[in-house]
Image: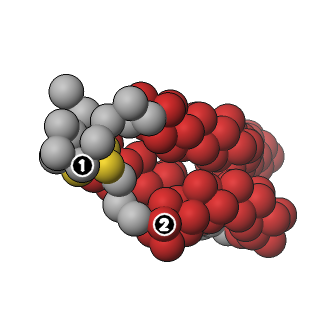
Amino acid sequence: MSASSTENSCETSNGAHDALQRRHTTRSVINWVLALLTAPGAAAVVAASYIHVLGSAGCSPDACGRLGPGPVPFAVITDGAPVIAVAAIALSFLTARHRFGIVVPVIAWILLAAGLIVLDISFQTP
């Protein structure tokens, strides 16, 4: 084996290692961005829930068809949204560098979106 072929294999190895390192870093950054953005997302869900309640304050059951999901689902959504955000951030400390670690913030965002959809569907005011 010649010296130039040894140098080329080292450069290829280092190039592949650098590409792998960049991919891991990018994956970790995306994970952390999604996980940290669950906190403002949870705040938006809580704000939307109270906006829906305030929007239906002048309604009577006869005038407005649906006045919300009921006290228990409403409490689960408003109290659960911040818990979901904290759990996503806490679990990201353990999973951010793993290959499928992005699943944690993605599931958190799916749960936050589901809560918002339930609120939008259940509060139908004219």
Which residue corresponds to the image point at 71% horizontal and 63% vertical from the top-left? Answer: 83
Instruction: Judge whether residue 8 can be spotted in this image.
Output: no
Q: What element does badge 1 sit on?
A: loop
Looking at the image, is 113 positioned above or below residue 79? above
Residue 12: name its quadrant. top right
Q: What element does badge 2 sit on?
A: helix
Instruction: Judge whether residue 98 can be spotted in this image.
Output: yes
Residue 19: name its quadrant. top right
Looking at the image, is 50 positioned above or below residue 109? above
Q: Identity of the amino acid at label 1? A: Pro
The mark found on residue 71 in the picture is: 2
| Quadrant of the frame with the C terminus | top left
Determine whether label 1 and label 2 are within 8 Å by CB: no
Q: Nearer the viewer, residue 35 or 83?
A: 83
Q: Nearer the viewer, residue 37 or 19?
A: 37
Looking at the image, residue 18 sits to the left or right of residue 63; the answer is: right
Which residue corresponds to the image point at 31% horizontal and 49% vertical from the top-left? Answer: 67
Disc 1: which residue: 61
